[in-house]
Image: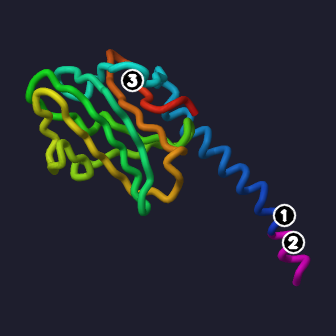
Amino acid sequence: MAKIWQVLLLLSIPLLIVIGYHHHQHVQQRYADFSITKQRITQPTTLPIADQPVKLHHYHQTLTHGKLWSYLEVTSPVKQQLNPHLFKLYQSKTTTPNIYFSENIHVNAKNSRQLQPGRNRILMYTETATTAAKHHLVIVTHRQNRYQQMWLRQSF
């Protein structure tokens, strides 16, 4: 009986390797046309997260009670709506990104996406089971036929 389990275990290992490799190839093909630009915040950066670009002054990410919180402090030139679909959360280069849902984005401590003229605080959260260091917040914008990604944390 023990030999049967050993044989089954030895046969299942190559199968798991093949499945993992196939999944990796599928993800690579899905995101092959992304043009990736990685940036670190050392001075105020302009972000295209609304109709008129806003300036990013501060970014912080932390994990508390199974929720990953991303905090951004931005300056908006006018009253405008935030585009929440531009925010993506990557765990690695090869995994499919998570998105922030509109109801999980709070601007100026309100459950709204309305940016006011001047300084604004954006707080976003998502459920996760891993550490905050393994996640990278990305802003994805569509330019012509390519996606440009602005990484708000260090590279992987």
Please rate how many residues cluster around mark 2, counting C-alpha atoms within 10 Å: few if below 14, some from 14 to 19, many from 20: few
The image quadrant that residue 84 belongs to is top left
Q: Which residues are magenta?
A: 1-8
Q: Is residue 5 magenta?
A: yes
Q: Is residue 105 left or right of residue 23?
A: left
Q: Nearer the viewer, mark 3 or mark 2?
A: 3
Q: Amino acid at mark 1?
A: Leu
Task: Please tell me the numbered disc located at residue 147.
Answer: 3
Count residues near mark 1 (Cα–Cα under 10 Å), then give few for <14, some for 14-19, many for 20+.
few
Residue 107, given in percent of the width and then of the height, sits at 19, 42
Pointer 1 or 3: first along the chain:
1
Say whether residue 100 is left or right of residue 119: right
- Separation of marks 2 and 1 at Cα, in angstroms: 6 Å
Badge 2 amino acid: Gln
Q: Are marks 2 and 1 in contact (CB under 8 Å)?
A: yes
| Residue 6 badge | 2
- Is residue 19 shown left or right of residue 63? right
Q: Position of residue 65 (x, y in %)?
A: 42, 63
Q: Which mark is residue 10?
A: 1
